């Protein structure tokens, strides 16, 4: 039994070793156990989701073009999927980890994700994509480094620091989703956490005693790369470090024109890299702050996360008021700041799609979609969120499996290009994307809060945003040269954001609100991209051998060597005597072929 599980793994390892010698792309292996833990981010004990005993989860630190293999064991009491925010999965939507492409991993089972970080660099993160689980944690960072032969467009930092900022509720994720299902709003968060920890007690009247806070240890005179991710539910956060400048150098896979900021608005789902030089005199520690934006004044004081930046030669604790952020209600400041972020078109690095293109503004747009969102409304007596009047209904059979096996009636390729003046409805309607088309998507926010949108499988060019209603004339304001390429963008209330994307990555890809509440209520759509000339499916990877089947295809589910219940998993302690025998068997098997 033991060898049955081990031999394929050893054979694969031997093959990869030889493959590396002959110039193939390396493999990186990770083994994760996703389970509940007890934590008290804001001083209240509650159940959070950790990975292999760590909350937040471990960082995937890999290099561009590496193959990543992550064996995820689901020790939760409900189904699980992990999605890789910003990783493009070239030709491989099977690894996307959302309900449109994958059957969820049942409790007590595991599933192995395998994907290549092809032609990518930068800062990304992963998180659980189903059942509102991101509200309980389960997230972690992804670092994709340049290959050694590709220089950084800045001096090599002395260290690398990952920061997760997030709004936080003291209610667990199951209670939060029940609140939404009952037709109620979640209400304001209970606080803001940094790396899963509560605020430093900078004000005794605001922060209670005994809360554990994050400390970032640094050396004087050195420069560190801070990778900051907003992994929260729905709150835009402003990030700043007392008395230190933030030199923006990268966002979600694109090197940016380097500019100094004293603070940066980071919206839900967004990731930024800053270079921060430790150039202060270390007379004391310094505050690291993540504070809420655009929230009701009555709750703002409690919605501030505070960590400590500690120089090794610090003379004492941080003191005084927190560093000022922007005016709380100034959306114009936030929009202008977002417009100032531009792509570094001269940097040497992996490039977003279209590959090697520096003149996206000269590419002819072939498809245009204007996606309108409104505040959540009742559909069939349920509170739902919509795009173009359609609230996405997730079928039991994932779209990608239904497409491959020609299962009828699962979805329709009829998502409207514009909002249609008709009653809103629940539907499984998919955008029929044209392979290698250049699609223009206008995200029009008629709601009352900032919305973030994310597209799996691609980097898109953010070419414009403004207040008011988008019109054809709005194209005259587009940045057609160095708009940043990224995978997540914000849309301010009463405003629009325009993105351009080249549809050369075959698959079914999720376009969603990153705001967890509106996403859970149906504010998402999928884009199907099929190569009509490829009868052999060479432009897309085949169905994985370890695919999980569900819905109309449940009868196809079979036991697989890399998917088993924990009771069947071998014990390395009790089976250690068999290890060398299995390796010898694997070696003979490898040499035979």
Image (cartoon, grey):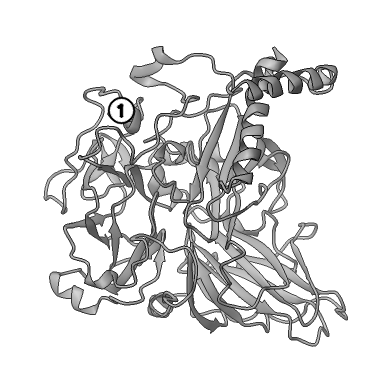
Local crowd size for mark 1, using a 10 Å CA cut-off: few (<14), some (14–19), many (≥20): few
Describe residue 123's horizontal placement relative to residue 52 as left or right. Answer: left
Residue 409 spot, x, y in % from top left? 21, 25
Describe residue 509's horizontal placement relative to residue 210 as left or right. Answer: left
Quadrant of the rendered structure where residue 202 is? bottom right
> From this viewpoint, which residue is outermost toward the bottom?
281
**Which of the pair 430/315 is nearer the observer?**
430
Answer whether residue 354 is visible to the viewer in this image: yes
Residue sitting at 30 percent across and 28 percent down? 404
Residue 212 spot, x, y in % from top left? 77, 57
**Which of the pair 198/566 is nearer the observer?**
566
**Which of the pair 477/223 is nearer the observer?**
223
Answer whether residue 205 is visible to the viewer in this image: no
Position of the C terminus by quadrant: top right
From what the image shows, is residue 182 above or below residue 294?
above
> From this viewpoint, which residue is outermost toward the left?
421
Quadrant of the rendered structure where residue 277 is? bottom right
Q: Secondary structure at mark 1?
A: helix
Position of the N terminus by quadrant: top right
**Which of the pair 229/569 is nearer the observer?**
569
Residue 441 spot, x, y in % from top left? 25, 59
Residue sitting at 69 percent across and 58 percent down? 198
Quadrant of the rendered structure where residue 346 is? bottom left
Residue sitting at 64 percent across and 78 percent down? 155
Residue 2 spot, x, y in % from top left? 72, 16
- Total label count? 1
Disc 1 target residue: 404
């Amino acid at each position: 039994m033991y060898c049955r599980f081990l031999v394929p793994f050893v054979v694969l390892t031997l093959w990869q070793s030889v493959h590396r010698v002959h110039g193939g792309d390396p493999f990186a292996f990770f083994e994760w156990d996703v389970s509940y833990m007890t934590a008290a981010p804001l001083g209240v004990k509650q159940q959070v989701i950790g990975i292999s005993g760590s909350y937040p989860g471990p960082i995937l630190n890999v290099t561009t073009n590496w193959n990543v293999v992550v064996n995820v064991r689901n020790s939760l009491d409900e189904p699980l999927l992990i999605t890789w925010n910003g990783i493009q999965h070239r030709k491989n939507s099977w690894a996307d980890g959302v309900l449109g492409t994958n059957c969820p991993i049942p409790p007590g089972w595991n599933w192995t994700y395998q994907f290549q970080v092809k032609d990518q660099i930068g800062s990304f993160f992963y998180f659980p994509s189903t059942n509102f689980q991101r509200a309980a944690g389960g997230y972690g960072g992804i670092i994709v480094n340049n290959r050694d032969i590709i220089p950084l467009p800045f001096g090599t930092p002395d260290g690398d620091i990952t920061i997760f900022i997030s709004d936080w509720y003291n209610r667990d994720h199951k209670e939060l989703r029940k609140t939404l299902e009952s037709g109620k709003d979640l209400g304001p968060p209970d606080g803001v956490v940094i790396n899963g920890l509560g605020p430093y007690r900078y004000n005794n009247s605001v922060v209670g005693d005994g809360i554990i806070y994050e400390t970032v240890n640094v050396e004087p005179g050195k420069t560190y790369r801070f990778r900051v991710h907003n992994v929260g539910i729905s709150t835009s956060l402003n990030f700043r470090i007392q008395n230190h400048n933030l030199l923006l150098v990268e966002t979600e896979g694109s090197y940016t024109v380097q500019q100094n900021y004293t603070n940066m608005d980071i919206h839900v789902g967004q990731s930024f890299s800053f270079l921060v030089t430790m150039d202060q005199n270390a007379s004391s520690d310094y505050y690291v702050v993540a504070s809420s934006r655009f929230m009701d004044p009555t709750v703002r004081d409690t919605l501030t996360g505070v960590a400590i930046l500690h120089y090794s030669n610090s003379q004492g604790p941080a003191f005084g008021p927190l560093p000022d952020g922007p005016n709380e209600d100034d959306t114009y400041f936030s929009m202008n700041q977002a417009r100032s972020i531009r792509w570094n078109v001269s940097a040497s690095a992996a490039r977003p799609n279209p590959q090697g293109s520096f003149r996206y503004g000269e590419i002819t747009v072939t498809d245009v979609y204007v996606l309108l969102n409104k505040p959540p409304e009742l559909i069939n007596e349920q509170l739902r969120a919509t795009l173009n009047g359609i609230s996405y209904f997730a079928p039991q059979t994932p779209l990608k499996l239904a497409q491959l096996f020609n299962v009828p009636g699962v979805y329709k390729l009829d998502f409207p290009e514009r909002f249609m003046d008709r009653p809103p409805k629940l539907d499984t309607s998919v955008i029929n994307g044209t392979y290698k088309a250049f699609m223009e998507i206008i995200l029009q926010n008629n709601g009352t809060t900032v919305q973030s949108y994310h597209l799996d499988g691609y980097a898109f060019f953010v070419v414009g945003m403004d207040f008011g209603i988008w019109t054809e004339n709005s194209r005259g304001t587009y940045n057609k040269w160095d708009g940043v390429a990224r995978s997540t963008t914000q849309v301010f209330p009463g405003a629009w954001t325009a993105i351009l994307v080249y549809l050369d990555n075959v698959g079914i890809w999720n376009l969603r609100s990153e705001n967890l509440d509106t996403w859970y209520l149906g504010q998402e759509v999928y884009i199907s991209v099929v190569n009509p000339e490829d009868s052999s499916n060479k432009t897309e990877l085949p169905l994985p051998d370890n695919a999980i089947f569900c819905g109309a295809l449940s009868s196809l589910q079979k036991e697989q060597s890399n998917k088993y219940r924990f009771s069947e998993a071998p014990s390395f302690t009790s089976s250690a005597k068999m290890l060398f025998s299995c390796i010898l068997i694997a070696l003979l098997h490898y040499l035979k072929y």
